[in-house]
Amino acid sequence: MNKKSIYALLCAMSCVVAACDEDFDDVAAPQQNPQEEAVTLPSVTATAGSAIDLATAESYIELFSLAPSSALPEDAELSNLRVELTAEKDGKSPLLINALDGMFASADLQSSIEQLFGKKPVERTLYAVAYADVMLDGQASIVRSDTFEIKATPNAPIIEEAYYLIGAPNNWTADASVIKFNHSGADVYEDSKFTLAFDFPKDDKGVNTDCWYKIVPQSQLDAWLEGATDWDGVLGCETDGDDSSPISIKKGWSGALKIAAVEDAKLIIVTLDMMESQLTYQTANFGAYLWTPGNHQGWTPATSVKLYSANKDGKYNGFLNLDGEFKLTSEADWEHTNYGDGGNGSIDPAGGNLSAEKGFYYMNVDLTANTYSLTAVNSWGIIGSGVANGWDSDTYQLTYDAEKNAWCVADAVINGEIKFRANGGWDINVGGSLNQLSPNGANINVEEGTYDVELYLINEEESKIVLTKK
């Protein structure tokens, strides 16, 4: 049952339940059919069974047994069984699930546990209150139980905190030379994806060759580092040499995974989704640009600012004005790979739109790790031995001219070396030459004079300074 359904059911019940007294021993008639005389009925007793493991449970399960009080009239009939679940005994905003013929859907219990506690497969204690409708003398009322406990373990795989690659890239050596996958650092049950980019293995002539490998969980690496020689915990595929993508992986499968050589590819990018026990890979020969269409420019890739990768190594940077949602495209159109938000600072070709508050930003993207960062740039200053304050502090502050799409200052007196830095610090700075600025570039030497300065920031290939001497 999804969250909307749960809350809808809660709302439907709220008026009826509210009519019960503080001890919930009285039974109120449904609001739409008020009774002339209130019918007071005793509560029922709910008793949970043994702990439930949802990994092995049937599709429908009996969460508890319900025993009506002996004081309940003999001809009363109970029906429409449901239960409210919370993570604490007096928890607020309980989740409601309904029974079907007295049995509860395992999927509904799984969903409730995930909402209350997360997906980690450890036993959880849920605090429950059972409700039932009572038919008596042609009128419907409600009874409820006292709070009782249900213990259950959600159905999820064991996901370790870290994973490593062993195989051709480290000569199949079972030690600390295994290559660690990247991860967002979030709870592994909220972000179960691990990524790794590495160079194609090469033969003695420097030509790409097939890559054979397996996956090593942290626990297996720890065992090796303590002297173990077994490979029992290593993840493989069912058939040796299977180069499918995606492909299922698990402990106990002896097959080694394979990625066939691609002549001009620079990198292999592997993604593990440990919630699905699945691996995918792609080979990459990165282009020089990523385009940045979005709200700020009408969602047209061809006219958007380009992020630039000087080494064509999958690592891009650039400056851009943003105003809400945007995406990254691998070409100047929508017909190729379009990157969106993967969560926790990651990008994903299947993700929704990225988003940023209106402002000027410096952006880094690393396609080898599927990550990105945005740094808001609120100011630019001129610093250096060629201006009055030297290297101690910014001498001139530039202001943004939206019409020129440039940062500008008038009447700057310069004689010697300068650089431009953002936000009064050195984390983001540009230098190099007047016609080609790059992040962390060399000092720029300017001949003596008074200048109007225009700083055009796009990317490492196109950023420049225009100096107009007075």
Image: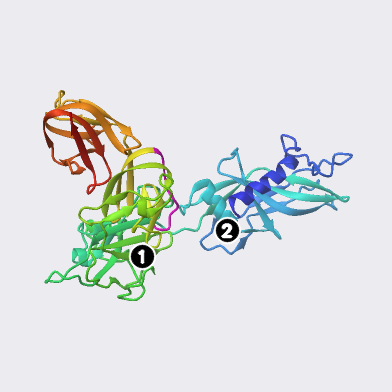
Instruction: Give the extent of the magenta segment.
Output: 349-358
Indicate the quadrant where residue 39 lies: top right
CA distance for labels 2 and 1:
27 Å
- Tell me residue 260's x, y (percent): 27, 73
Residue type at the position of mark 1 = Thr
Q: Does the magenta portion include 163?
A: no
Position of 431 relative to 346 (above/below): above
Residue type at the position of mark 2 = Ala
Quick one: label 2, few (<14), some, or many (20+) residues within 10 Å? some
Residue at far front of view: 470
Seen at 75% across and 38% down, the residue is 20
- Tell me residue 108's x, y (percent): 59, 55
Q: Which residue is mark 1?
A: 280
- Tell me residue 273's x, y (percent): 39, 60
Q: How many marks?
A: 2
Disc marking residue 107: 2
Front position in the image: 335 or 183:
335
Front position in the image: 311 or 165:
311
Q: Is residue 394 visible?
A: no
Position of 105 relative to 299 (above/below): below
Question: Left or right of 368: which side holds 352?
Answer: right
- Tell me residue 13's x, y (percent): 71, 45
Q: Earlier in the sequence, mark 2 or mark 1?
A: 2
Indicate the quadrant where residue 441 lies: top left
Q: Is residue 289 visible?
A: yes
- Image quadrant holding the C terminus, namely top left
